[in-house]
Structure formats: C-alpha cells, structure tokens
C-alpha cells in the first residue's frame, strides 16, 4: 500500500509536495499501518537528454530523482515512479504535459536509471486507444525483463490499458482474465479450453494463435488471487436464446487461477 500523487495533484506535483507527503505518511501513522510506497507522476523533463536518458523536471524537481528517493528511503518508505510503455505517457498523450518521454525503445536504459535512483516500485501505464492484448503483453514483457536485468528488486505494477473500455475507467477484472484466457487457450488442455474459453459469439478475445509471445508480467500468484475474486461474484447466467457454451466464469476458481498462472509457461498444463 502507499500514496500516489496523481489523484491529489495530477501533473502539478512538485518535489516539495512529494517530500511533504512522505513526512505526512510517517507522522500520521500511515507508515506504521503498512503504507510504504510513495509514487509520483509528471516528474520528468519533457525531453530526454542528449544521450537519451530520462531526467527530472528541473523546475518542479530541482533536487533530482536520486535525492528524492534518498529522502523517501530516509523516512523508512519506498520510492515509486511512473512511466509508460508507449512513446508518450498518459498525460503527454492527452496533451496535459509536454514532450514525448515514454519508455518504448528505451526500456533497458530507463530500467537502469530507475535502479540507479533507488526506485522500488514502477507503475507502468499503457495509454493508447490501440494495441492488441498480444502487443501489450510484448511491451510489458520487455520492461519486465529490463527491470529484472538490473538486479534491483522493483515492484512492477502494470495498467494494461487506460484507454480501452475493458481495462480503462470501466475496468472489470473478469474482462481482462477472459481476454487473457482466450489468447492463451492454446496452452490449455482441450477440456479446460472448452470450460474457460470465451463464448462462440464473443468478440472480445484475441486469436489463440497469438499465444506464443505471451508471458505473465506481474506477481502471478498474488495477481491471480486478487483478480479472481470478482468473477465468482459477478458471473451472470446465459440469457435465453443466447449461446449456452460454458464460459470461463462458470469454471472453478482453482481452474481459473491455474489458467492465469499458466500464462507464464508455454509448457504448462492445467
């Protein structure tokens, strides 16, 4: 758990405000209650430097990101940062922040600089109206591998898409699991594929042939436990006259959990 600057400050956030938030998390007792991450957005200079490196906005974050991370760590908290897997971040994409400093094409470079700043948590936010599930998985995987290569433990928190209805402001966990299972059903045994696959009249899933590049891009056991609570509560019966093929929502929770975990292993069998 932690504090994210976006809801309070948006792109108006400054270094001073992040430091004040860290102080308040300690003095208010939030740290003792388990809140540990301080995450900020719109921290970056609108342009990378001549070598292609990200850098702090010199006006809003004059001390730089390494110094800010050190301050957060001195409070016994953890340092979180925001980036996006496209050419632009969410704010840049909608025109509320200048520049084009997304991580696409700079994943290894950005991961290395995050590690050098002492970053403990990366929120990686896909903000584009385009991009299939397979394309999103591929991009998220690149950064996952780049973070892993740094050798620094960094929590990798992905938002699969802020601009798509199934995963944006109307996000429902079951929709994402449904789509993921459709993409990766080729890895499942025939009996499970029939049970958890999409209905025949469903247009939400990707072709199963695109499964070869898929991989689990977050903490699979925890993710599967948290996201799979909602399907059992929200499963709806098939309306009369509609396709009655069994859907993923009718599958046992243990089967769904195994199916999601299998996304990380092409040799996995449920």
Image (spheres, rainbow, N blue to C red):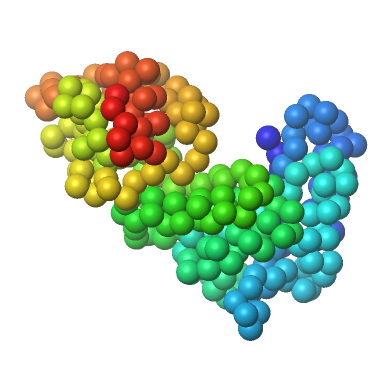
Q: Indicate the quadrant containing the C terminus: top left, top right, bottom left or bottom right.
A: top left
**Along the line of sight, the residue nearer the viewer: 163 or 183:** 183
Relative to 246, does residue 8 appear above or below in the rendering?
below
Question: Which image quarter holds the N terminus?
Answer: top right
Q: Quadrant of residue 242?
A: top left
Q: Residue at x 68, y 56 (%)?
A: 115
Reply above or below: 66 against 220: below
Q: Position of residue 253 (x, y in %)?
A: 37, 18
Res 184 quadrant in image: top left
Q: Nearer the viewer, residue 161 or 10?
A: 161
110 vs 104, left or right, is right
Does residue 176 appear in the picture of this structure? yes
Residue 225 position, x and y percent, is 48, 24
Q: Is residue 48 left or right of residue 140?
A: right
Q: Position of residue 244 (x, y in %)?
A: 13, 23
Residue 190 coordinates in the image, percent (x, y) = 16, 27
Q: Identify the residue shown where x is 31% and y is 39%.
A: 266
Between 260 and 102, the one lying in front of the other is 260
The residue under the point 81% across, 57% down is 68
Q: In this rendering, would 133 be left or right of 93?
A: left
């Amino acid at each position: 758990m932690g504090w994210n600057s976006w809801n309070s400050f948006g792109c108006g956030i400054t270094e001073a405000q992040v430091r004040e938030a860290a102080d308040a998390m300690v003095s208010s007792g939030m740290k003792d209650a388990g809140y540990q991450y301080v995450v900020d957005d719109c921290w970056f200079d609108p342009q990378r430097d001549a070598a292609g490196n990200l850098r702090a906005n010199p006006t809003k974050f004059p001390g730089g990101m390494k110094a800010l991370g050190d301050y957060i760590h001195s409070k016994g908290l953890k340092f979180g940062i925001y980036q996006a897997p496209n050419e632009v971040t969410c704010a840049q994409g909608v025109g509320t922040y200048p520049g084009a400093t997304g991580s696409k094409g700079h994943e290894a470079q950005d991961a290395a600089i995050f590690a050098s700043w002492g970053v403990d948590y990366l929120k990686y936010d896909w903000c584009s109206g385009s991009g299939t599930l397979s394309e999103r998985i591929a991009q998220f995987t690149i950064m996952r591998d780049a973070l892993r290569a740094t050798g620094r433990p960094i929590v990798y928190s992905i938002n699969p898409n802020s601009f798509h209805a199934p995963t944006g402001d109307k996000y429902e966990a079951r929709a994402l699991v449904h789509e993921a299972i459709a993409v990766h059903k080729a890895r499942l045994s025939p009996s499970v594929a029939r049970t958890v696959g999409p209905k025949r009249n469903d247009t939400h899933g990707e072709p199963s042939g695109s499964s070869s590049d898929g991989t689990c891009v977050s903490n699979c056991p925890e993710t599967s436990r948290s996201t799979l609570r909602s399907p059992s509560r929200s499963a709806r019966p098939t309306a009369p006259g509609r396709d009655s093929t069994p859907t993923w929502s009718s599958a046992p929770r243990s089967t769904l959990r195994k199916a999601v975990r299998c996304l990380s292993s092409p040799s996995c069998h449920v």
